[in-house]
Every structure is written in C-alpha cells, then in structure tokens.
Amino acid sequence: MKVLLIEDNERLAGFVRTGLMAAGFVVDLTGRVDDTLAAIATARYDAIVLDLGLPDGDGMDVVKAVRRPGGATPILVLTSRDGLRDRVDSLNGGADDYLLKPFAMEELVARLKALLRRPGHVLGMVLICGNLAFDTVARETRIGNQPVALSRRELDLLELLLRRAGRVVPREAIEDSVYSIDDEIASNSLEVLVHRLRKKLQTEQATLKIHTLRGIGYLLSDDAS
C-alpha cells in the first residue's frame, strides 16, 4: 500500500513516515501544495495523510484537487484546528477522517487501515491464494499453518500480486507501488526482489508461483488449482 504524506514540519513528518513504514506502508513525502499536486498527478496512491497547515496554501486545496475528477482516494486529515466548524468543514470538503494533533502513531495507523477497509477501497483483511494466506492488517504471511518471514518490501510485492492474482501486473506498476520517490532503484532491483520472494515461496512449498513475462511484468497463479 502506497501512502502520500503531506506535512511541512520536518520532525513530525519524520515521525509519521517512520511509523507508517513500520506498519508496512510505502510512503512518499511532500511539504507544500505545489509539490503535492505534482505528486498526485504523476503517481497513484492508496491513501493520503494530509496536514492542513501548509506554507504555500491550505491543505483543503489538496482535498479539492484530489476530489475534482471524481477521485475516491481516502484522505485522512491531520490538524491542530480543534473547533467543531473546522472539523465539519474538513469532512464536508471531501476528507474521509481527521485526527487532532498531538496524536498517537498507533491511532493514526488504525484509522488509516480502517479507511482502507471501507467498501470500495482496497485493503481486505486476509488475502488467500492456494495454500498461502496473507493478513494485510497484521502484515503476516502463512503457508499452511507455518509463518513465513518476509521483508517489508517482499510483503509489499506479495500483496500487490495477490490482489491481482491471475492477471499480469506491469513492472512499472510494481515499481510505483513498492518503491517511494526517494528510493534509488537499480535497473535490476525489481528482478532481485522477485527472485528473493520466489525463492522463499518455493522453500516453504507454496503452491502459488510468480511467472515472469519478459519485458512486460509478472503474474501470480496457484499452480495447484
């Protein structure tokens, strides 16, 4: 799951980004309205975490930009504006939820996952393919009854492939979902990541396999079915 975090306070942005990454999210970070509009124009995000007080404009301008084309990306607003009218205006303006500062990281993660579990969004509780089950909330993978140790990036790749099992996922879409804009991506980074995940699945005797379509992308299928 890829999240766009919009926060201009460097200390708070670092705290939130670290917490979201620890919860299994890929995180891009911006701190200005203009940079944010450029980011949402070029990348697809599963959710947005937005601070309303930005140095070059109001965060609600971002909400309006996301909603203008009929976009349904979940938006969670972070704000120190604790007046009832401010909260109502945020929700009426297109935000899905809000969280008052200061806040606990655990609550932010829980609220974000709750938004993504709503009908029409993308975060299901458990994804199953063959003899593998992936708990998207706990970020745990099991083959049969045995837990499988995977890195955060391997989990991101597996979740993306599971959600599109039986369909080809273009490599560009995988790179966009698995890596943030700050990551340095070598020409063979994705191949290495796929190789590691494929080897672990084979070692643990998973019935599902990752197929390579050279020059196109990857496809996950249950070869036991």
Image (spheres, helix red, strand yellow):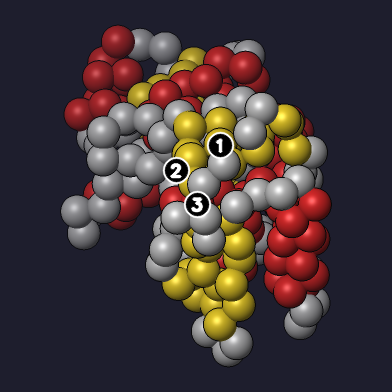
Q: Are marks 3 and 1 in contact (CB under 8 Å)?
A: no
- Distance Cα–Cα, label 1 vs label 2: 24 Å
Q: Nearer the viewer, mark 3 or mark 1?
A: 1
Quick check: 208 above or below 120?
Answer: below
Depth check: give the residue in front, 86 or 71.
Answer: 71
Q: Secondary structure at mark 3?
A: helix
Which residue is under mark 1? 133
Residue at the spot 71% in from the left edge and 71% down from the top edge = 190
Q: Secondary structure at mark 1?
A: strand
Q: Which mark is residue 82?
A: none
- Distance Cα–Cα, label 2 vs label 3: 19 Å
- Distance Cα–Cα, label 3 vs label 1: 10 Å
The amino acid marked with disc number 1 is Ala
Depth check: give the residue in front, 198 or 144.
Answer: 144
Residue at the spot 72% in from the left edge and 61% down from the top edge = 198
Residue 85 location, quadrant: top left
Residue 205, x across and y down, in percent: 71, 49
Quick check: 111 above or below 192?
Answer: above
Q: Crowding near pointer 2: few (<14 within 10 Å), some, many (20+)?
A: many
Q: Nearer the viewer, mark 2 or mark 3?
A: 3
Whether residue 177 is visible to the viewer of this picture, yes or no, is no
Which residue is under mark 3? 162
Depth check: give the residue in front, 46 or 166.
Answer: 166
Residue 38, x across and y down, in percent: 47, 66
Which residue is under mark 2? 47
Depth check: give the residue in front, 175 or 155.
Answer: 155
Q: Are marks 1 and 2 in contact (CB under 8 Å)?
A: no
Q: Crowding near pointer 1: few (<14 within 10 Å), some, many (20+)?
A: some
Residue 221, x across and y down, in percent: 50, 61
The amino acid marked with disc number 2 is Ala
